[in-house]
Structure formats: structure tokens, C-alpha cells
Amino acid sequence: MSDSKERLAESVSALMDGETSEIELHRILKEVGIDQDQQIDSPDSVRGIWQRYHMVSASIAGEPVDKIDLSASIAAAIDTEDTHRQNPITRFASSTGRFAIAASVAMVAVLGVQQLNSPDPASADALQFAEMDIDAGQQNTGPALQFPAGFQPNAPVRTVSAGGAVNTSQRPAAFVQVRPVNSMNFSEKQLRLYMDDIMLRHSNNAALNSNRGMLPFARVTKNEAAASQE
Amino acid sequence: MTLKHWCKNLRLAAFIAAFFAHGPLFAEQNKSAYDLVAGTAMAAKELNYQGVFTYEFRGTLRSIKVAHLVRDGQTYERIVHMDGAGHEIVRRGDDVGCLRPGDMLLRGSDLMAESGSGLDDLYSFYIRGNARIAGRLAYMVEIRPKDKLRYGYVVAIDKINGLMLQSMLISQSGKPLERFQYVDISFPVDLGNIQLPEQLVHSQQAPGCLDSSASADPSISMWQPNWLPPGFVLSDIKVDSATGDEAWMYTDGLALFSVFIDSAEKSRRFPPVDAKLGTTVAVLNKVTVGDQHYAICVVGEIPDATAKQIAISIGPLVGTLEGAAQAVK
């Protein structure tokens, strides 16, 4: 008996004890199918092994050993049953029905995706707001109060909070990232003031040129620039 | 069996109906969503209103009380910050008839020809349903950018008078970056109780209103950007002839960014930096022409990458600064 046959016999033995895995079971059923197609009915075929093992187990258990093969008559009985007889017309009808269902599902999916493939901000914004502004590059945000005032030590980019003294309350500080350069002599405080001033100038200009109503007034305010000069 | 057939027919009918309804239905919404957004600028200018709005970003909340008043064709605004130091601004806005490049772009005027693309080419507009904001019924409109160079918006627009009651800036990943929203607003016929300071009434409005389709004149500048995101046009330019400092403002009708070019000594020693406050990014770049140092800063409510790309592209106009540098020597 070849190696693979031996393994197959082991699987059959396991199947008798109800200990096969799904894959093993499929392999056994496939072998049965192959044997049937090739009209093999030797004692080495899966069916042969199956019958032999049962005879062995029956004889060990002291039951009467008798070779009765019911499989052919069972198969014949199943064939004569109405539900399993395939009528070409009903088969066609049912496949059309299935197609119709699939088509309508696809239609719904297409329409639905068009409606939904963007986040529905009307309903979801409240939830999403908790995680707002976590775009890459500024992950170390957290509450504004926890901003470090000085440079953070992590090289090669250094971070500054361009906000002035830390103790100036709830005012959110700009997140300033210094791009690595050959060392330049500059005052961190002056840089912060400069950036604050630039943002303020932008927001003043924006208020004049924007057509978005009062919105620009809210963004960066004199309030903050003044506070940072304390 | 007849029921089965009937169901099948119904399914087919629904399929066909959905197919035909689809195109025109969405096209109709598209058009009106754009019109709604275009109408907000005019509504904000022409209406009398007072109210309180909140502004949220990165877990910070500000509340701001505003009044907008139209008197004799002039607009006045009062903005009071309700938190912190209680800062107050009273200012004269533009005349009701004043149109700036941003307004022109939003309305789809001739400026489009200059920018090469209309707002419709840059953003998609969708009506996403209804909402109730500050006690008023509103349409929710989503404005989605067609490229990665700008942010999107979700705005709520008053159904009756077209004022923008809520606006959220939406990042490319679909997350809100900031939220502006009225919590209370009223539209009195006359805000007679507001006394306007005399000097405001007689002051001139800020220059830059357009009576034709002309945009700001960039020829006074010594610098030029070699790359701009599509659709942005120059909206305002100021050049200080004494110091050589320049301030530009660009808009695509919705988004805005400023460019500041600074030759001042104080900025000389600053390294290139990227800064971010809320949704406003600032990219500071350094350029040396001859032996003169310039700080070029791009600031705006645009994605970092866009701001960086603009900042890098800005260079001196050939034959201006070099010439000046030579002359100094």
C-alpha cells in the first residue's frame, strides 16, 4: 500500500471514530468519487477499506459479521424521490429568480454606495468629533493644556508649541515643527511670536476676503496674539 | 405561481425605474446644492442678524457673539468673544454691493476664465438631507473636493434665508477638523438698538472691491509663485515699498490662503518651520537672493502638503530682485 493510501486508511479509521477534520472528510469523499468514476471496487478502495474496518470492529465487539451493502439501494431510493429529481424548467426558473435577486441587490448596493460612500456628517459628526484632528504628523495633540512649552528632545525634528508661557490657560497653542537645518541661532520665543503674528495677519485678511460669513473671526484672534505677548 | 410572477414583474419595474430615475434626480440635486452654497455669501452680507455661534477644533470650544447690521447700504459687524479675555471687535464691513474675487468665484463669474476652472470643477456639491440648527430648519450640503489639494466642507444652510448656520471643515480622510455653528440666531428687521461709533459710519470700506471682473494686480510684486493649486486666484495684494514686504491672498471661492514675504531683520535668523493652529497651517520657508534673506510664509486653511508645495514654488521674478541686489552692491 502506497504512502498516500496508508494515510487515507488512517483517515477512514478516524472517520469511524468521528475524529476527522473537515479537510480529511472532504479528501475521503473525493476519493470515493474517484473510485466510483473509475469503477474500482477493490478491497484497497475507500469503500473496501471502510467495509473491512467495520467488519474488523464488529468481530472485535463480538457482533455477527455479515457483509451487507445497502448503499446502492439507498442511492436508488433517493433518486426516485420527487424533491431530488431535477426538472429543467424549474431549474431555469429558479436560476432566473436568483439572478433577479442578485441584480436587485446589486442595484441597491450601487444606489446605496452613492449615497453612503461619504461619511454622513449630519448624523455622525458628534461621534467623530471626539477624534477630530488626528491627521498624521500631529498625533501628540491631546488636550491643549498638556502641550510642552519647550522643545521636545526627539530628534531629528524638534517640536515647539508656539504659544508663549505655559501657564497662560486654556488658549490653544500652535503646533510648530522646526524642520532640521544646519544650526541657526534664533530665539524660540521670538519665533513663536512671529508665527502667531503671521497667523493673525492671515485671519485678518481672511475676514476681509472671505465669503464665509463670520467664520474667519473665530479661527485665530487678536485675543491669542495678545495673550502670548504677556 | 401568479404571485411569483407578479413579484418578478415588480422587481423588473423597480429596476427599470431606479435606472431611469437615477441620472436626472441626482443632477437636479447637484445644481441646487451649488446654488445654495453660492447664495450664502450674499445672505451673510445682506441680512440683519444677531446671534451666538460656537467654534470647535481639537477639543477646544469658543463661543462668539455676533451682530451683523446693514444700514444705508453699508454693513457693520460686532464680534464679541464670550470666553477668555472678552475681546470685542466693531468694524465696518464692505458695502452691500461690494464683490471681492472670492464672491465672484463663488457665483461663477468671469474670474473663472482666469483661474481656468469653476467651483464646479474643483468641488462636488451634494444635498445630504435636512437638519435643525439653532432652532432653524436647514439643508445639509456636502462640498467634496475633487483633488487632494484642498479640504472639503459640510455646511448647513438656512432653508428660509440662505444663511450658513453651520460649517465643518472635513479632512481628506473624512474627519471634521473644525466646526462653526450657531447656537442661537435671530433676524430682526432693524437693529436700531445698536449705536454705531461715528468714525465707523464715515470710514471708507477696505479697498479691493471689484466693479468689473478684474482681479488683483500682481504686477507690483517682485515675486511670483511657480505653482498654485488649480482654481486659486489672487484676491488681494499689498506691497510695502519701503521694506519690500509683501502680503498676498489667494482664494478658490471657498478656501483661502495668504502668502507673506518678509525681509525684516527679525525673521532672518528663524529656521524653516511648519506650524499649525487648529485648521490653519503656516509654512515658513527661507530664500536668499544676493545677500538678502527673505522669509516666505504660506498660511491658510489648506492641507500641509499643499502649503508646502506653494511655499517651495515661490521665487523672485527674474530681473527684479537680482537687479536690485546688484544695484546695492
Image: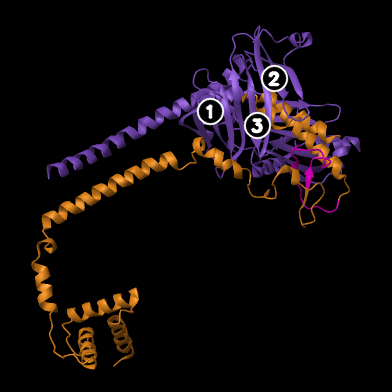
Q: How far apart are marks 1 and 2 (CA)?
A: 29 Å
Q: In this view, does B290 lie to the left or right of A171?
A: right
Q: Chain A is drawn in which colour?
A: orange
Q: Position of residue B140 (x, y in %)?
A: 50, 30
**Helix, strand, or loop for circle 3?**
strand
Q: Residue at the far left: name it.
A: A80
Q: Colour of chain B?
A: purple
- Give whichever of B201, B28 is nearer the camera: B201
User: Which residue, given by chain and number where applicable, does mark 1 sit on?
Assistant: B156
Q: Distance between the residues labelled 3 and 2?
A: 28 Å
Please give the range of residues in magenta: A160-183
Give me the residue at 85% from left, 34% from top: A229
Dots 3, 2 in contact, CB < 8 A: no
* Quadrant where the image shows the N terminus of chain B: top left
**Parent chain of label 1:** B
**Parent chain of label 3:** B
Depth-wise, is mark 1 or mark 2 nearer the camera?
A: 1
- Give whichever of B16, A219 is nearer the camera: A219
Depth-wise, is mark 3 or mark 2 nearer the camera?
A: 3
Dots 1, 3 in contact, CB < 8 A: no
User: Which residue, given by chain and number where applicable, does mark 3 sit on?
Assistant: B55
Above-or-below relation of A80 to B180: below
**Parent chain of label 2:** B
- What type is the residue that disc 1 sits on? Ala
Residue B208: give its label: 2
